[in-house]
Amino acid sequence: MKITRRTALAIVAGGIASTGIAAAAVSSFSDEDLVRVTLEKYFGPLNMRIEHLQQFVLEFQNRNPWIFPSAKVADVVTLAETVKLGKARELLPQDKRRDLRHFDRWVIAEFHMLTDYAWRSSPDDPVRFTGWHPCTNPFADLELQNA
């Protein structure tokens, strides 16, 4: 097999173009994208308007500012989950994988507390951000106990 100068230049140009496209795709990801792909990984496609997702992510960040992974790790994970390469997480160092599992658990827990996901009457109903609600249990004893 003989490689001509044109073939070599085409291969180099293709590599540069695909690198540029990947870099542009990764740099365009936001925190909402990471949260959406994480939730869709566990719950399937979400019927949630972008405004509600943005409110959820903002409240999640306010309540748990230390939970979000670094920007580079978040972009890589978002890209991997978007193109259905979730197994790429296994290539990350162990501490990063542990941080991502911790992030996944917190996002799922907060998603159940801050949205109406669990109270929808049908899986086709849209998910809405409801915010934090105080305890509404009529049997709760909220008075401080004097010891």
Image (cartoon, rainbow, N blue to C red):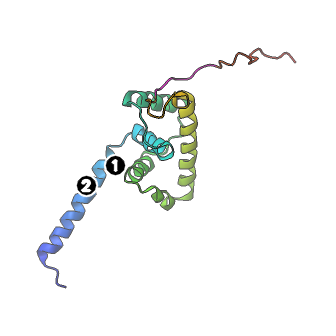
Residue ranking furthest to the front: 122
Q: Quadrant of residue 134?
A: top right
Residue ranking furthest to the right: 147
29 left or right of 11 in image: right
| Residue at horizontal 43 percent and vertical 40 percent from the top | 36
Secondary-structure class at tag 2: helix
Provide the residue span drawn in magenta. Answer: 128-134
Query: Residue 66's spot in the image, x, y percent?
Result: 54, 38
Q: Residues within 10 Å of mark 1 (few under 14, many from 20)?
A: some
| Residue at horizontal 41 percent and vertical 52 percent from the top | 76
68 left or right of 142 in image: left
Residue ranking furthest to the bottom: 1
Q: Nearer the viewer, residue 46 or 73?
A: 46
Q: Quadrant of residue 105?
A: top right
Identify whether 8 is placed above or below 45: below
Query: Residue 112's spot in the image, x, y percent?
Result: 56, 32
* Quadrant of the frame with the N terminus: bottom left
Mark with earlier residue (2, 1): 2
The amino acid on which the numbered mark 2 sits, given as a three-letter code, is Gly
Q: Which residue is labeled 1 in the image?
A: 26
Q: Which residue is labeled 2 in the image?
A: 20
